[in-house]
Structure formats: structure tokens, C-alpha cells
Image (cartoon, rainbow, N blue to C red):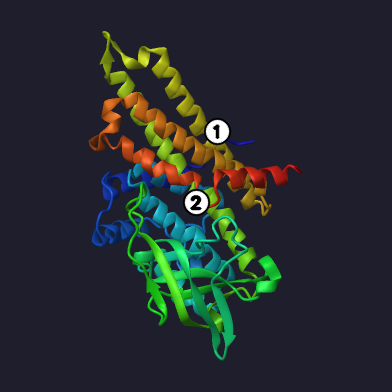
Amino acid sequence: MDFGWTLEQQRRHDEILEAARSALGPEPATTSTEFRKKWREIGDLGLLGACLPVEHGGAGSSALDTARSYEALGEACADTGVVFAASAHLFACAVPIAEFGSAAITSRWLPGMCGGDHIAGNAMTETGAGSDVARLATTATPVDGGYLLNGEKSFVSNGPVADVFVTYATTDPEAGHLGQTAFVVAAEAPGVRVGEPFEKMGLRSTPASTVTFTDCLVPGDAVLGREGMGATIFQHSMGWERACLFAGYVGMMARLVDRVTQHARRRKQFGSSIGRFQAVSHRVVEMHMRLETARLLLYRACWEMDQGRPARLEVALSKLAASEGALASAMDAVRIFGAQGFLADAGIEAELRNAVPSVLFSGTSEIQRELAARELGL
């Protein structure tokens, strides 16, 4: 068992750390112009197509190397919203297009998605279908030349700025999960309407909105895989998302450990640095333990994926450890920083707000525990 990195892997990690710190900065993107600028920088780092085939413009990295790269991005870039946006673009949209898209679809979209010219949004969630994704109200009706899409997606990350959507619709209401089909739809297609950006607690630099399809004609070659494969395709992309997207949160946890450690050394109370007080030092140790637990589970899950194994248990545990750990550690950071942590200027309260949704998207923590329980035979 080797816990070390090759010289090339370490070089790449350090390169991303340095470049992201320099180019992305600590302030969140507040305008579409700022978002696009950061998006281009992430594309220039090769991260928007990290795990995609080289022939499509990607880097061809393994799941483990991809996770390591996004961990570095999450550590270096305090704008967790843009890290999340890039992750959702790659793992929920680009990965299924690369794996299941036709030659026409992959050649049209993937080079731009890898380079930063195109932004993708994953249009799955509906008002009545969050965790229960087998009950999609959005329908796709076969017609001459393709399908007519009708329905509304209630929460689409990157929706307001997306050039393309990966969406899922019911093609056979009687077939349950075998009646779902995946589609690639251009944002400019007739019948696509994007709602106003949501005001959100956290991840504020990730633009999100509703997306409505009204008699939207989708050509037959825009189907991913084939009709009825939607649930399989979605679960495949979720494997990547639940593992590698949360590498960004592992990076965030590393950044928090570093910040609270420095603060605990500098901050003086009762004639001593607060890091000398057991109540503080033990809290920092707990934060570091959560970081290392999440990191090791993440690497194990990605290693299993690279071996071609299902890794369902490992991915569920990894997602659970990273999301719950990020939330608990962000709360600890607020407590260690005290009143300063409550103020916006320090940026600590933003870390907490950005951590909260991690236990909700890509399957809630309760769903991850249920998935793990099933894999354990319960």
C-alpha cells in the first residue's frame, strides 16, 4: 500500500495550488463577467475537462488524479461557489456526454466545455423529484425527428449562464426507473426558458435557477445512450460527482484547518495564545481528524473507481464524510474565531454558508447512509 504521490502528481498539485491562489483570489464572483473570468482561468488550468478523454480536449486523468486536482482547487480558491460550479459542470454534465454521447454531440460540445468556452448545467431536480429521481414529471414525447420535452426543473446549478443542459425526462411512465431518458439540450433551443437566478444561503457565486421546457424539440441524436438509459446514466455521473465534486470540500477543510491553526497561534487571551487552551486545541484536532478521514475515504473511493469497481459503498461513505465533515469544521471555525468569525470581513461565516448545502445536493446525507446500508446488506 503506497501513500505517496509521484513527482508528476505532486508537481501538478502544487501547480494548481499556486495558479489558483494567484488567479482566482479570495473574493466570490458577484457578476456574470467575474464568473466568466474565473471560469476561463479554471479552464486554462485544465480542470474543466480533467477526467475527459484527450481527444475531446480533456486531460485524460484518472479519478484519483482528478480528485487530487479538485482538492487543490478547493484549498486554493476560497470562492467555493465557483469551485462547485466547475465540478457540477464536469462531473454531472461533461462526464455523461463523454461516456454516452453521440459523435455529433461530443464533437459539438466537449472541446468548448473542456476549454471554458461553454458552461453546462445539470437539469435533473424537480419540485416533486429531489431524492426520488425515478418520478420525473418532465416528459419526452417521441415525434418525427426526435422528442418534445415538456416540464420544469426546479434547481439547475449554472442554469442562468449555461450554454447547454444535460436533462432527464420520462419517456415511459409505466416503466419506473427504466422509463427515464437523458438528453443534451442547447440553452438557445426554442422552448427553453431559464428563470431568474436564485438568492441562496451559500454558494452564491454558483448561479442557479429553474429551467422550463415547453414543446422543446430535441433531435434523436441528442439522446445520451439510448431511450430508457437515463437512470443508469444519472447514477454513473453521480458516482463521479459524489466522489470528485466533494474533493473541493476536502480542500476547503484543509484551508480551514490552516486558518484556524494560524489564528489559534496568534490570538491572545489571558496572557496566552488560545491554541494553548485545551478547549481550542482539541477542536482543531477534531477538524484535522475530519479532514484526514474524508481525504482517505475520498482517495479510496477514487482508487476503486479507477480499478473499474462499482465502489458504491466507498463513494457513499466518502461523500458523507466530506460533506458532514465540512459542515462540522466550518462551525468549529466560527467558534474558534469567535466574534470575528461571525463578521463577513473575515470570510469564515461564508465558509459555513457554503458548507451547509453540501449535505443536501448529490443525495442528502440520509440518502448516503441508506445507500451504504444497502451495500452492507441491511
| Residue 141 in the image: above or below residue 9 | below
Q: Quadrant of residue 77?
A: top left
* Residue at the (61%, 73%) spot, across then down: 225
The numbered mark, 2 or 1, whose residue comes first in the sequence reads 1
Q: Quadrant of residue 113?
A: bottom left
Is 377 left, or right, of 185 in this rendering?
A: right
Could you tell me the amino acid type at mark 1? Thr
| Residue 293 in the image: above or below residue 28 | above
Q: How many marks overall?
A: 2
* Residue at the (51%, 78%) spot, across then down: 149
Residue 196 coordinates in the image, percent (x, y): 33, 65
Of 141 and 346, which appears nearest the observer?
141
- Tell me the SS state at disc 2: loop
Could you tell me the amino acid type at mark 2? Phe
Would you say residue 134 is visible in this rendering? Answer: yes
Of 339 and 52, which appears nearest the observer?
339
- Residue reaching furthest to the front: 128
| Residue 261 in the image: above or below residue 94 | above
Label 2, label 1: how far apart the Cα atoms are: 21 Å
Q: Which mark is residue 44?
A: none
Disc 2 target residue: 361
Give the class, few, some or many, for how many residues have Cα within 10 Å of label 1's Cα (few <14, many ≥20): some
Give the class, few, some or many, for how many residues have Cα within 10 Å of label 2's Cα (few <14, many ≥20): some
- Tell me the SS state at disc 1: helix
Q: Quadrant of the N terminus?
A: top right
- Mark 2 vs mark 1: in front: 2
